[in-house]
Amino acid sequence: MKTACTISCVFTAILYFATTWVTAHDAPGDSHNASEDYPLIEESLLIDIDLADDLVIAVGDRGHILWTEDYRTWHQAEVAVNSTLTAIDMVNRNLGWAVGHDAAILATADAGRTWQIQHYSPEDETPLLDVWFDNENRGIAIGAYGLYLVTEDAGQTWLPVDMQINERDEIDEGLGQSEELIELYDLHLNAITESPDGILYIVAEAGKIYRSEDRGKTWDELPSPYIGSLFGVLALENNIVLVYGLRGHLYRSDDGGDSWQRIIVHTGNTISSGVRLHNNNIILAGTGGLLLMSYDSGYNFKLVMTRERNNFAAVVETEDEQIITVGDKGIRSLLLQSLELIDE
């Protein structure tokens, strides 16, 4: 579906899942205009956030990029497009990349103050949904309809590449796989992440999960416990992996994705993002102000009491023991010590 204003009915307000969504102001041919100043930008739709040392950068609607160094005062960056931006990856405090609609890829070399276009293809109407960099030169951007772009020269050139996937010979019984074969190019690749051990994971539509042990050169298709869309993946030490998505679906693996266990959470809200805290606890965030906390490496989660009804799209932890979330109502900061768990 590549029609204007199409959006996932589950996450109506947040473009994080908007793999087929193009806003009226993002019409092809118009979105190459620079992002404009916005008076209430901290309350605008923001879709992803990243942290590098004391620098926090958030990206979102209309090409908006915000940065802060004190976690209180936010500044709007100079951005060369007004396409909706869906993901950001900071390699270090100065260097980073953001991706979004119109297959836009932007780069910064000045700690997020200004952003330049490296790739832009509005005629394809194919959004990029996540980006990961191995180092200052090599990166991967993924998106809708199996779009997979690679750079080896710090983004000077981005080349479309077919994922080299080692498909499984058979489908494990009881893991929820569909009998219908789905071509990769039809699938939206939703998120990419790296474990502390250097293993990469991609999650996609139709419950697809991929793992790479050679920095993204080849991928193994893993057994999946779920046939619905997976929107995020959190990879920890010791081969612990969490994948999550629609209606509170959450699964845990302790063998790098070779097998999965359903983690029951008492919510039907979509889970969109997760972060491991400095104290090794885990927080997951999602729609309707959803926050989930785990103290045992993801075996169990408890609901966090929050009066927020912001549809959280992403979350990070800062150095002063607070979490910052972004979503359809903009930026929210919460002190970790103030979070109250709900006894179930």
Image (spheres, helix red, strand yellow):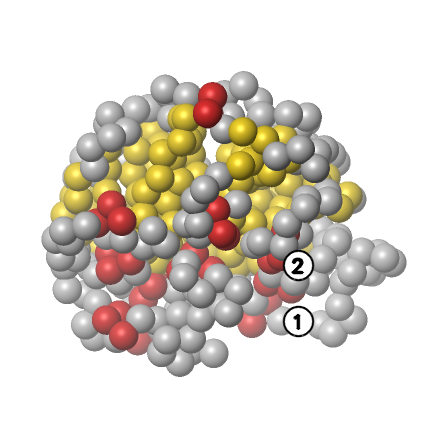
Q: Position of residue 288 (x, y in %)?
A: 49, 52
Query: Residue at label 1?
Result: 182
Q: Amino acid at mark 2?
A: Gly
Which residue corresponds to the image point at 24% horizontal and 25% vertical from the top-left? 70
Q: Are marks 2 and 1 in contact (CB under 8 Å)?
A: no
**Residue 338 visible in the current orientation:** yes
Query: Residue at label 2?
Result: 207
Task: Label 1: state its secondary structure.
Answer: loop
Q: Nearer the viewer, residue 190 or 68?
A: 68
* Among the 4 quarters of the image, the one containing residue 75: top left
Q: Position of residue 126 (x, y in %)?
A: 39, 69
**Residue 209 visible in the current orientation:** no
Q: Position of residue 320 (x, y in %)?
A: 36, 19
Task: Label 2: state its secondary structure.
Answer: helix
Q: Amino acid at mark 1?
A: Ile
Q: Position of residue 286 (x, y in %)?
A: 51, 48
118 relative to 233 in the view: left or right: left
* Among the 4 quarters of the image, the one containing residue 88: top left
Residue 71's mark?
none
Q: Nearer the viewer, residue 149 or 230?
A: 230
